[in-house]
Image: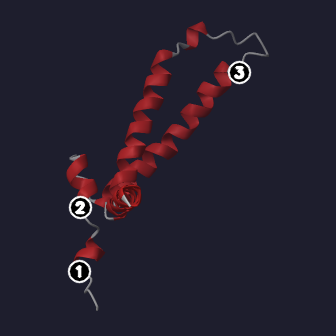
Amino acid sequence: MPDEKKELEQKVKVLEQQLQRYEQHGSAKLFYALNRKMNEMADMLNSNSLNSINIDDAKDKSFDRIFKLLEKSETVANSAKVLGIIAGVTGDEDKDTARKPFIETVATKRD
């Protein structure tokens, strides 16, 4: 019996964690995830100097990869900007992601 009780407690804990994720503000959470990726992209671009890339070597794809990252940067930045507006991001990640979306605050519970 004690093992069954521990298993049941563990299942409840996992389900509570899953429920907590569904109660978070998804669009704000996605905004902050994109923002972190933009920072990682910037760090990656800053760590590579175009002067050190051998563009004469056809096998070296470094320039192509950096150029592709530069091309995608605008798309990622625009997506983050729009998500930030839609989600009403304030800059306080904990507060923004914990806040329930507007529709959930006005919906009526029905029994």
- Which circle's residue, 1 or 3, is located before the other in the chain? 3
User: Which amino acid type is shown beneath numbered disc 3?
Assistant: Lys
Q: Is 66 in front, or is 34?
A: 34
Residue 31: x %, y % from top left: 37, 50
Can the viewer see residue 16 in this picture?
yes
Residue hosting label 3: 61
Tags 2 and 1 touching, CB below 8 Å:
no
Image position of 79 with respect to 58: above or below: below
Front position among marks 1 and 3: 1
Q: Position of residue 105 (x, y in %)?
A: 23, 75
Mark 2–mark 1 Cα distance, whole angstroms, equals: 13 Å
Dot 2 amino acid type = Arg
Of label 2 and label 3, which has the lower sequence position?
3
* In-image side of 24 versus 47 (left or right): left
Instruction: For marks 1 and 3, give the CA distance.
Output: 53 Å
Residue 51 is left or right of residue 98, and the answer is: right
Residue at (55, 32) in percent of width and height: 70
- Examine the rendered structure and indicate whether residue 28 appears above or below residue 41: below
Q: Which residue is mark 2?
A: 99
Give the labeled residue for mark 1: 106
Label 1 residue SS: helix
